[in-house]
């Protein structure tokens, strides 16, 4: 509470919009550190997210590409697990640091746009309390590095526009190239930035050999994943087609989600920022970035992308909104009586509203409440990952019980096969402690890692389509049904566990039927 009180004290200072004033680095650092501390405080409250378990497994199969994402996140997962003793809290240090980066980047953008000390602090606090950022940076998934690289790319483009020095294209190309190894989503931002520049008089910056050099750097950094995809028949296209199955739903919830995810206190700031950066003469220099952010958001809506895909664009819009916000607060009449005015300054009241918004967002964005609460208050309807982070050890223990119940000769010829990559990743993470063999799955890259050993003619199948099992095995029997013990509805609640024996063909022939790219 002392650090937050210190931040409040800094925020409540009257604004100084002089561009030459020294940035309030101490206040920004306090806010960034508090955001990092909040993430770490609840980092291990539930458990691994489904995707985190997948990335841990992928980190043990390092490659230049994967079916459903580029290679950077599995590499980060392997590094984090090795550095932090394979602990959940250790894995989540990196995304928590990413949130601190978003805070600093947003404040820095606001300074570029003309915000004074108070405006910069409010921009930092808005980023730190934005529900979308809190949720996205809570887990080590592809979204965490994607958001960071989007924010850094936007900041670098602002440097390019401010200096008109085309050499910034080299740094922009490097950032976009590295980002492409985290998530393909960066391509939308790159295209939107090009459109934003072309739509304004800043188009002259597109006529530079440094842009060509930056493009070559970006292409070179993206090439390993692209080559891997080509060599494996472009499996990412199958994933894209599967995602398009939810495009209609995504469009229906897209705009309400932008308000819900960013929160009631931050939404007016980014909306104001979008309008101000498009209309105000003071923002003219950086208008290409504003156009790019709006294009990126609208493009994801048109394409039916998930609501959080363009979330990092809000770093710039929040930064832009902090400029008119600061000026509006400075122009307000003093609160009467004077004694109360000294205690409750307009900026402090705004900061308090942001913090209140973060308190409201925390149960949805973070694993803040007891997991059992999700039974009566299904917050996972808003944030799917909340319920997908519970009871993995319990599931693996049930699988181990059924596996050990098999006679020893049969057990030696029995593999464990799962229906999704979260279940397979959980068995690979917790199974060694229960003497379980590695898991196999037809889900995404697990399918590419191959079928069970040729000598295995039986499986303990977790959440696998029983019709598929009956087609490939002579005998299939239901041996258990998984319940998470909390009454929480998620993808594993009620999952059936089968023992299937008598493989009708070889695994080489049967394995293609198990493939599920989604």
Image: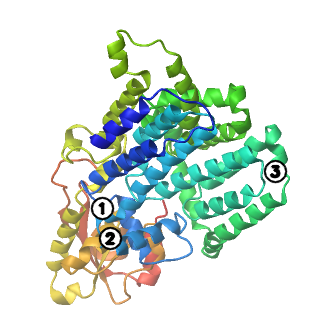
Q: Which mark is residue 84?
A: 2
Residues at marks 3 and 2, CA–CA distance in whole angstroms: 44 Å
Residues at marks 3 and 1, CA–CA distance in whole angstroms: 44 Å
- Residue 455 quadrant: bottom left
Q: Give percent across and percent down for residue 322.
A: 54, 31
Residues at marks 1 and 2, CA–CA distance in whole angstroms: 8 Å
Rendered view: 301 above or below 405? above
- Residue 20 quadrant: top right
Left or right, 326 with respect to 166, comes to left
Q: Along the line of sight, which residue is nearer the eye, 345 or 65? A: 345
Q: Which residue is mark 1?
A: 89
The answer to whether marks 1 and 2 mark residues whose Cβ atoms lie closer than 8 Å is: yes
Secondary structure beneath label 2: loop
Q: Label 2: how many residues lie within 10 Å, few (<14), some (14-19) or many (20+)? A: some
Q: Give percent across and percent down for residue 375.
A: 21, 42
Sequence order check: which comes first, mark 1 or mark 2?
A: 2
Kindly identify the residue that appears in the image at 72 percent across and 49 percent down. 160
Secondary structure beneath label 3: helix
Q: Which mark is residue 206?
A: 3
Image quarter (top left, top right, bottom left or bottom right) of the N terminus: top left
Kindly identify the residue that appears in the image at 79 percent across and 37 percent down. 200
Rendered view: 74 above or below 487? below
Secondary structure beneath label 1: helix
Kindly identify the residue that appears in the image at 37 percent across and 9 percent down. 336
Rendered view: 269 above or below 440? above
């Amino acid at each position: 509470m002392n650090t937050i009180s210190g931040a409040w004290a800094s925020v409540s200072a009257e604004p100084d919009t002089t561009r030459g004033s020294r940035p309030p680095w101490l206040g920004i650092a306090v806010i960034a550190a508090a955001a990092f501390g909040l993430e770490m405080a609840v980092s291990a409250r539930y458990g691994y997210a489904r995707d985190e378990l997948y990335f841990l497994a992928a980190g043990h199969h390092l490659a230049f590409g994967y079916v459903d994402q580029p290679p950077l996140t599995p590499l980060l997962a392997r590094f984090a697990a090795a550095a932090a003793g394979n602990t959940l809290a250790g894995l989540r240090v990196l995304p928590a640091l990413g949130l601190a980066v978003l805070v600093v980047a947003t404040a820095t953008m606001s300074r570029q746009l003309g915000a004074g000390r108070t405006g910069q602090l409010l921009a930092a606090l808005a980023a730190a309390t934005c529900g979308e950022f809190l949720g996205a940076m809570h887990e080590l998934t592809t979204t965490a590095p994607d958001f960071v690289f989007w924010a850094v790319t936007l900041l670098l483009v602002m440097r390019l526009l401010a200096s008109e020095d085309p050499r910034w294209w080299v740094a922009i190309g490097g950032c976009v190239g590295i980002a492409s190894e985290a998530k393909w989503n960066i391509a939308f931002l790159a295209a939107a930035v090009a459109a934003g520049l072309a739509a304004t008089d800043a188009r002259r910056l597109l006529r530079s050999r440094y842009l060509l050099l930056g493009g070559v750097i970006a292409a070179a950094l993206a090439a390993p994943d692209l080559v891997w995809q080509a060599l494996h028949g472009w499996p990412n296209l199958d994933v894209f087609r599967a995602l398009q199955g939810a495009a209609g739903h995504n469009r229906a919830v897209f705009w309400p989600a932008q308000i819900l995810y960013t929160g009631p206190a931050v939404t007016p700031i980014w909306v104001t920022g979008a309008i101000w950066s498009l209309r105000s003469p003071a923002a003219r220099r950086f208008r290409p970035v504003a156009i790019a952010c709006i294009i990126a958001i609208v493009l994801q809506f048109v394409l039916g992308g998930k609501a959080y895909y363009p979330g990092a664009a809000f770093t710039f819009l929040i930064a832009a909104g902090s400029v008119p916000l600061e000026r509006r607060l400075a122009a307000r009449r003093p609160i009467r009586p004077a004694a109360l005015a000294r205690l409750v300054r307009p900026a402090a009241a705004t900061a308090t509203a942001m913090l209140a918004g973060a308190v409201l967002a925390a149960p949805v964005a973070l694993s803040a409440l007891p997991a059992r609460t999700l039974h009566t208050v299904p917050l996972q309807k808003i944030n799917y990952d909340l319920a997908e982070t519970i009871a993995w050890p319990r599931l693996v223990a049930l699988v181990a019980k059924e596996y050990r119940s098999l006679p020893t000769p049969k057990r030696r010829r029995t593999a464990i096969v799962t229906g999704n990559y979260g279940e397979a990743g959980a068995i690979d993470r917790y199974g060694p402690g229960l003497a379980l063999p590695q898991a196999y799955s037809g889900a995404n890259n697990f399918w590419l890692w191959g079928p069970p050993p040729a000598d295995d003619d039986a499986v303990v199948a977790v959440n696998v389509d029983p019709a598929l099992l009956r087609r490939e095995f002579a005998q299939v029997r239901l041996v258990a049904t998984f319940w998470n013990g909390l009454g929480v509805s998620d993808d594993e609640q009620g999952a059936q566990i089968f023992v299937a024996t008598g493989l009708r063909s070889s695994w080489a022939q049967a394995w293609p039927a198990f493939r599920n790219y989604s």
